[in-house]
Amino acid sequence: MAETRLCIEYLKKITVYLQGAQGRGKARASEDGYYLSFIYGIGPDGLTPFEMKIAGKTAGDELFFDKAGMHLDHLFGHLTLWMLPFMERLDHPWLYVRVEKVEAADQKEVIRALAEIAQSRDSCCCS
């Protein structure tokens, strides 16, 4: 029987690998990247533009984002808080994204993620 690959959809636990790139298709394996894990679709303002772009993707899918004229904090929305160390050193014109894992999230993970988002919104002056 063929293995069914989960696709990105609401309440799935997603892990993506992020890396700076010089252009579309030009990610560098030798550079440090960043792994981000999150529960899809639970942001306080609905889906982020990033989540909209990765909807329906499966593990192994790759995307490139041209950073010209793009504000990464808008692209990632509430996910930005967990990416600050990576974003501070991202000086490339493109952003490479590879979907590493798509898996079912257990209820505890969803509740924990919702609590973290609520707490970060409460302690942040950006709302």
Image (tube, rainbow, N blue to C red):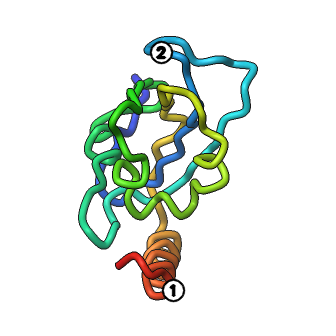
Q: Residue at x 59, y 33 (%)?
A: 91
Q: Residue at x 33, y 48 (%)?
A: 51
What is the x, y in percent for residue 18?
A: 56, 36
Q: Tell me the distance, in whole angstroms, between the alpha carbons under discs 2 and 1.
A: 36 Å
The residue sitting at the bottom extreme is 122
The residue sitting at the front extreme is 69
Cβ atoms at labels 2 and 1 below 8 Å apart: no
Which disc number belongs to residue 123?
1
For mark 2, what is the residue? 23
**Residue 4 appears in the rendering:** no
The residue nearer to you, when weighing 90 against 121, is 90
At label 1, the amino acid type is Ser
Q: Residue at x 28, y 48 (%)?
A: 49
Could you say whether the residue bearing mark 1 is in a helix, strand or loop?
loop
At label 2, the amino acid type is Gly
At label 2, counting other C-alpha atoms closer than 10 Å, the crowd grade (few under 14, some 14-19, many 20 or more) is some
Residue 104's place in the image compared with 52, above or below, is below
Quadrant containing the N terminus is top left
Horizontally, is 24 left or right of 30 in the view?
left
Residue 90's place in the image compared with 45, above or below, is above
What is the x, y in percent for residue 48?
A: 30, 54
The residue nearer to you, when weighing 21 against 47, is 21
